[in-house]
Image (tube, rainbow, N blue to C red):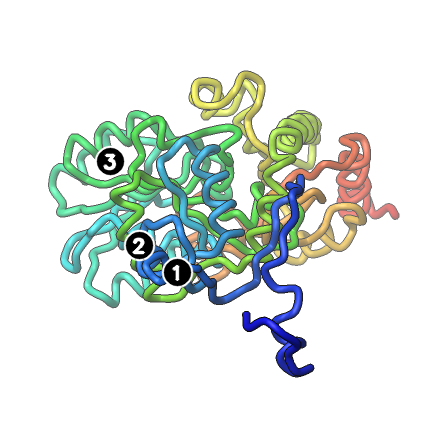
């Protein structure tokens, strides 16, 4: 800046910018700047490299976002991680990042998040990609599809939504790679605290950071974690399409992951307590939770996850019709009716009227999703209070109490 006293208008713009001291904050800094200044012009040019370490324009890279990406790469145990404005943006980028071409097929789990299915059935199908669905709990069926088809990607979730079926992640990755098919794992339900699919061979790991990573229901974000070579193409795609996460949102996720290792075990223990109690209720036909010894996914969950931890998600079936479910939901006072998961509060979702509402009743039944199925993201409240809330709702709906 030019020496000497500047006019007021100039000082209003430039005063205080770039000031620094000999201190280091314990909380990460938020950098809302869109552009960055260097003393040497050559540094600006070098910073435009897709995987460079500098910053020029925040659609390419941002210091707060980069701090989050380094943290997430460490947690996922990958060379790189890239942050996006939502989990869906991350899934879209990861699929394209595999290098799949129109005419090839995306082989995806039948039990897949509704938003992911919509992305496949509309956007990718319209672009000329084949879409095949398979039961990923049956590795032989997956291999049979891979052997006869022209799949370029296998997309699945280790724990399915909303029936909490558990996939044999190492076996699926192995069979996909044997057929030269890239693997994209949506690890949102587990989070990197419970499972790190890249260490099992997954090519791309996707997380909706809106959920357990953020953890407080106050941020939308997504990430793709992968090796450095794959990250270059995904970063170029993100820069071209403008899907990068904002600095304030990155800061919120950074704040959230600092307590991830404290929150996830509590989510798990609360979920186990609620699932165990629900399994004793005469109003409940079946509980889906891989932490219960009678659950079909119990053995695989014990192999994949830390001992005694099976996640914070569960679902349970009743014989209620749509109207009865609405009455039950209205009777809950502590649990919140919400379409998300992984927040500090307990969230309840009715798949038939939310995540899978676009399907016919027959299509939902084929997936095992009955009208009386409810999904619960178990929060961090006292487990006694969570159980009491559900107990009161059962009493109101099934016994006419208050």
The residue that mark 2 highlights is 50
Which of label 3 and label 1 is nearer to you? 1
Circle 2 sits in a helix, a strand or a loop, which is it?
loop
Q: Dividing the picture into quarters, in which one does residue 183 lie?
A: top left
Question: Does residue 4 appear to the left or right of 242 in the view shown?
Answer: right
Please tell me which residue lies in front, 32 or 114: 32
Locate residue 316, reporting x and y percent.
60, 38
Instruction: Classify 113 as above or below 135.
Output: below
Q: Which mark is residue 60?
A: 1
Residue 328 seen in this snapshot: yes
Q: Which mark is residue 381?
A: none
The residue positioned 46% from the left and 45% from the top of the image is: 69
Please tell me which residue lies in front, 298 or 116: 116
Disc nearer the start of the sequence (2/3): 2
Please tell me which residue lies in front, 228 or 76: 228
Please tell me which residue lies in front, 76 or 67: 67
Question: Does residue 12 appear to the left or right of 98 in the view shown?
Answer: right
The residue positioned 25% from the left and 43% from the top of the image is: 229
* Label pair 2/1, CB-CB below 8 angstroms: yes
Residue 373 seen in this snapshot: no
Locate residue 1, reporting x and y percent.
54, 70
């Amino acid at each position: 800046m030019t020496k000497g006293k500047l006019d007021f208008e100039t000082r209003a713009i430039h005063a205080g910018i770039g000031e620094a001291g000999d201190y280091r904050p314990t909380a990460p800094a938020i950098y809302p700047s869109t552009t960055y200044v260097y003393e040497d012009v050559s540094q600006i040019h070098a910073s435009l490299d897709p995987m460079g370490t500098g910053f020029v324009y925040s659609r390419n890279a941002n210091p707060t976002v980069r701090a989050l990406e380094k943290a997430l790469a460490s947690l996922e145990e990958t060379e790189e991680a890239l942050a996006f404005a939502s989990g869906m943006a991350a899934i879209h980028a990861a699929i394209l990042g595999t290098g799949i071409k129109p005419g090839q097929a995306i082989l995806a789990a039948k039990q897949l998040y509704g938003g992911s299915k919509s992305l496949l059935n509309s956007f990718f199908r319209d672009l000329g990609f084949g879409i095949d669905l398979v039961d990923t709990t049956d590795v032989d069926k997956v291999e049979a599809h891979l052997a006869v088809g022209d799949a370029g990607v296998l997309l699945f979730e280790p724990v399915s939504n909303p029936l909490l079926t558990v996939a044999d992640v190492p076996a699926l990755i192995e069979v996909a790679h044997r057929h030269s098919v890239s693997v994209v794992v949506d690890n949102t339900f587990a989070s990197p605290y419970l499972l790190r699919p890249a260490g099992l061979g997954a090519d791309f790991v996707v997380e909706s950071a809106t959920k357990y990573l953020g953890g407080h229901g106050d941020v939308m974000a997504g990430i793709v974690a992968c090796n450095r070579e794959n990250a270059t193409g995904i970063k170029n795609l993100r820069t071209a399409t403008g899907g990068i996460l904002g600095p304030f949102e990155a800061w919120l996720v950074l704040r959230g992951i600092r307590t991830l290792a404290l929150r996830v075990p509590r989510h798990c223990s609360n979920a186990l307590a609620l699932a165990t109690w629900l399994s004793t209720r005469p109003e409940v036909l079946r509980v889906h939770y891989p932490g219960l010894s009678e659950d079909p996914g119990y053995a695989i969950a014990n192999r994949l996850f830390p001992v005694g931890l099976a996640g914070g998600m569960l679902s349970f079936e009743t014989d209620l019709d749509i109207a009865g479910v609405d009455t039950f939901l209205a009777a809950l006072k502590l649990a919140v009716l919400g379409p998300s998961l992984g927040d500090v509060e307990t969230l309840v979702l009715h798949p038939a009227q939310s995540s899978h509402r676009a399907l016919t009743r027959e299509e939902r039944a084929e997936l095992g999703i009955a009208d009386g199925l409810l999904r619960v993201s178990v929060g961090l409240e006292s487990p006694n209070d969570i159980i009491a809330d559900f107990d009161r709702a059962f009493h109101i709906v099934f016994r006419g109490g208050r």
